[in-house]
Amino acid sequence: MLLGVDTEEDITVQPLPGQGVVAGIVAALIGAGVLSVILVGGDSIVTGARSSLEALEPGFEDIRQIGQQLFTNYVFALEVTAALLTIAVVGAVVLSRRVADLQPMPEPESVDDEHDVDAGLYTQPVGAGTPTTAEDGD
Amino acid sequence: MRNLDLAYLALGAVLFSIGSFGVLYRRNSLVMIMCVELMLNAVNLTFVSFGRMLDDTAGQVIVFFVLVVAAAEVVVGLGLVVSVARRKPSASADDITVLRG
């Protein structure tokens, strides 16, 4: 359903004419630009000093080095990502909560109604007075 | 060895351009999220290969943070896609135009 394989969409009709051509040109420019830099530049595109403290030696313990880096030099970024994940979980819960008195969206005239969900699935009329039970979603 | 590193960089560039083409061209919101993930992982590959070239673990440490940001983006993006698809299950990005004021 989410991938849209069950919808009969006329893909020959472009809502934005020329979108495919512009998208192809932009993507080809991005790819060709970076590829030409790599191909023309060769080794000289890698600038910067080679690391001496955090050197990756073959046979040396890689995972231990990464773990030490994460919890010493990058510990603030690690905590910030933890907070980011917490915020994302809260956002997902809020977005996926099924509100009891959800009304169907008032639609503009230009939107076709043929794919609309039956409104009775999600909506309860306001003031219908069903006491909130376990299906409240919280 | 050098040529192999450059080949990884070239693969990252190709994957990034494929992902950007998908974001610009596709109309399905879910496929657009997948293409954003493709772009993020192309950048991850570039980070790791530069870290290998410079013998630095920072290239691999950054990948952790990129992955966490990608996970958060997928969580919120999938929530938005599902909540839009509940009301209009045609799974097209054009449906979100009903959010206009």
Image (cartoon, grey):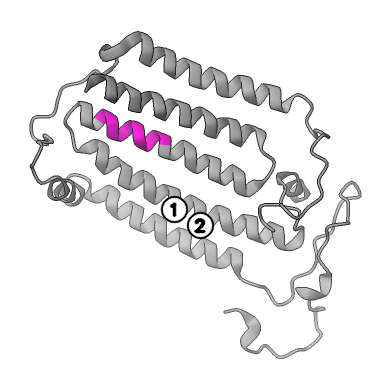
Which residue is disc 1 drawn over? B71
Give me the residue at 32% from left, 42% from top: B63
Distance in Å between CA atoms under marks 2 and 1: 6 Å
Near mark 2 (Cα within 10 A), the count class, few <14, some 14-19 or many ≥20, is some
Residue type highlighted by circle 1? Ala
Please give the name of the residue rendered at 47% of the width and 58% of the height, measured from the top-left corner: A88
* Total tally of numbered discs in the picture: 2
Give the magenta-colored segment's residue range.
B42-50
Q: Which SS does the magenta portion mostly show?
A: helix
Q: Residue furthest right?
A: A109
User: Label for residue A84?
Assistant: none
Report if the CB atoms under discs 2 and 1 are less than 8 Å apart.
yes
Under circle 2, the secondary element is: helix
Name the one closer to the observer, A54 or A75. A54
* Furthest residue in direction top, as rendered: A40
**Location of mark 2 (residue):** B75
Seen in the picture, residue A54 relative to A28 is either above or below; the reply is: below
Residue A28 in the image, given as x and y percentages of width and height? 56, 20
Quarter of the image holding residue B60?
top left
